Image (cartoon, grey):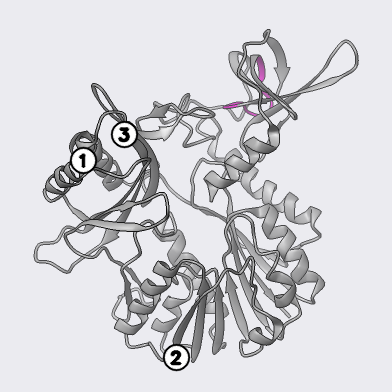
């Protein structure tokens, strides 16, 4: 989703080829939604030029060089820090100057958290959405990221695997990366040194790595790696064989190839990768899910548990629940583990493999009679008011584009409560405005910072009437 948003952003800005402009002195006055510092200068003819500068803080006085022009102004690079902002710090990460993974390594952590909260509150305020309560912001910590997506390329003299450099196709190895779980860093090392060398020269693509918890086999490690490779070109038979042989020596639960068509090919499976969800801290009453290869999972397990707990509290008295854009059911399936589970949950999504995983998990826990799923594109075919009538509450977690087609019918329905989760405050504000016009009010909202030190902001809110 983030990658699609980036492509749309780049297209809208219509960037011209890179160039090296003359240095200019600027003062950073604001931080934009991408995390860039923003400066404006007045030219001799009275024209105002805007500059967008990576790793710049509000209050910095800088000498910068324009490197790219677009309709909004210039992207620029820092040549010299004349006067540093009070918010500027020395980054923790050795790759901060180049890596495109984090945008805020140079910003003091309190200032960073304030920026995220203020950005969300400003966006909602412009839409006329004022929550009765702002719940404390959730902030991820170093080493808690349990999934990642990286680029890789086979070179003549080796392999490179890592994050993209900011505004570039260059790959930066995540050496010393602090946000990734240590097991993810181990998995990346194994990929680079043992699996990726099996590829033909010039092969390239992306890879998704997710940490899963398994206990199915004797002496199983606490964490297994679920690896889904997205090559630009389909692997040869020899590449596949060599990779599978290498994979068998490591704690890789599953190795998959996802083709450009979206079809998933299982290459190797030592044990089905698992995640376990429960509202009970003892995990005596839990649901175990085997996620589909490459399917969406929350990036931080602590954030996921917090979201599940809050949804369970809000929907404790609701018996008929619609889970829209449900994926594998991470927000609704845990409701089945409470002492008195809901009578009926329907999960709707356009990802059939995720829906299959959801149903398999529900059946394994003996809840098949409480769960149903529907493969449906809610962008093109939203649930009607009549179809929503049997439900008294809904959970909705759409992709970045939001759920503009679905929201009017939710607003016109008889639903009493809606829990909204969003990875884009702008589309959230638009959708929330539709609910507000339909008689819902926002009882509480919360910023959920799963992608620590990035400009990516998630949030959650409760609407009721």
Q: Sort mark 1 into few (<14), some (14-19) or many (20+) by Cα contacts within 10 Å.
A: many
Numbered circles on residues, count:
3
Q: Nearer the viewer, residue 296 or 135?
A: 296
Task: Please report whichever mark, 1 or 3, sits nearer to the chain's N-terminal start.
Answer: 1
Residue 230 falls left or right of residue 91: left
Q: Eyeballing the image, is 58 above or below 362?
A: above
Check residue 61 for magenta coloring.
Answer: yes
* Percent position of residue 217, x then y: 12, 67
Q: Which residue is label 1 attached to?
A: 195
Q: Is residue 336 above or below residue 118?
A: below
For residue 48, side relative to residue 257 (left or right): right
Image location of residue 139, percent across then percent down? 50, 51
Q: Nearer the viewer, residue 456 or 340?
A: 456
Of the numbered discs 2 and 1, the one sitting upstream in the chain is 1
Tell me how far mark 3 sits from mark 2, CA to CA.
52 Å
Q: Which of the 4 image quadrants contains residue 305?
A: bottom left
Observer-nearest of 104 and 46: 46
Q: Taking 191 as reference, is 96 above or below it?
A: above
Is 70 covered by the magenta stretch? Answer: no
* Mark 2 and mark 1: Cα distance apart in space: 47 Å
Mark 3 / mark 2, whichever is N-terminal: 3
Q: Which residue is mark 2?
A: 340
Q: Residue furthest top?
A: 22
Q: Is residue 31 visible to the viewer in this orientation of the structure?
A: no
Q: CA distance from mark 1 to mark 3?
A: 13 Å
Q: Which residues are magenta?
A: 54-63
Q: Main secondary structure of the magenta part?
A: loop
Residue corresponding to mark 3:
203
Q: Which residue sits at x=25%, y=44%? A: 187
Q: Residue at position x 63%, y 44% from top?
A: 114
> Considering the numbered disc 3 on the image, is that residue within a helix, a strand or a loop?
loop
């Amino acid at each position: 989703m983030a990658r699609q948003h980036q492509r749309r952003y780049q297209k809208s800005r219509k960037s011209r080829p890179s160039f090296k402009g003359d240095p200019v002195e600027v003062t950073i006055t604001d931080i934009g939604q991408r995390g860039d510092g923003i400066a404006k200068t007045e030219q001799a003819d009275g024209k105002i030029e805007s500059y967008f500068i990576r790793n710049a803080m509000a209050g910095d006085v800088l000498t910068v060089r324009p490197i790219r022009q677009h309709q909004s102004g210039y992207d620029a690079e820092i040549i010299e820090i004349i006067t540093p902002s009070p918010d500027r710090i020395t980054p923790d990460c050795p790759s901060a100057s180049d890596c495109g993974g984090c945008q805020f390594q140079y910003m003091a952590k309190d200032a960073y958290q304030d920026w995220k909260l203020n950005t969300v509150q400003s966006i909602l305020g412009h839409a006329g959405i004022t929550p009765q309560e702002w719940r404390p912001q959730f902030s991820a910590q170093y080493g808690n990221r349990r999934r990642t997506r990286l680029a890789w390329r086979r070179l003549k003299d080796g392999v490179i695997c890592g994050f993209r450099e900011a505004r570039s196709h260059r790959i930066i190895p995540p050496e010393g990366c602090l946000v990734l779980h240590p097991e993810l860093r181990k998995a990346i090392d194994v990929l680079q040194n043992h699996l990726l060398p099996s590829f033909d020269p010039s092969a390239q693509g992306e890879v998704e790595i997710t940490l899963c918890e398994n206990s199915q086999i004797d002496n199983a490690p606490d964490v297994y790696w679920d690896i889904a490779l997205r090559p630009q070109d389909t692997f040869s038979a020899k590449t596949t064989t060599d990779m599978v042989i290498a994979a068998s020596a490591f704690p890789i639960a599953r190795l998959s190839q996802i083709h450009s068509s979206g079809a998933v090919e299982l290459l190797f499976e030592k044990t089905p990768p698992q995640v376990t969800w429960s509202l009970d801290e003892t995990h005596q009453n839990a649901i175990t899910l085997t996620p589909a290869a490459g399917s969406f999972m929350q990036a931080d397990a602590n954030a996921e548990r917090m979201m599940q707990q809050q949804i369970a509290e809000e929907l404790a008295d609701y018996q008929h629940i619609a889970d829209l854009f449900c994926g594998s059911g991470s927000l609704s399936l845990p409701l089945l583990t409470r002492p008195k589970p809901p009578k009926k949950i329907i999960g709707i999504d356009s990802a059939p493999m995720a829906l299959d995983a959801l149903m398999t998990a529900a059946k394994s826990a003996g809840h098949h009679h409480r769960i149903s799923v529907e493969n449906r594109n809610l962008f093109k075919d939203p649930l009607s008011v009549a179809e929503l009538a049997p439900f008294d509450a809904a959970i909705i977690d759409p992709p970045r584009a939001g759920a503009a087609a679905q929201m009017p019918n939710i607003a016109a329905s008889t639903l009493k409560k809606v829990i909204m989760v969003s990875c884009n405050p702008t589309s959230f504000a638009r959708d929330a405005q539709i609910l507000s016009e339909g008689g819902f009010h926002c009882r509480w909202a919360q910023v959920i910072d799963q992608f620590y030190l990035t400009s990516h902001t998630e949030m959650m809110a409760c609407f009721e009437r």
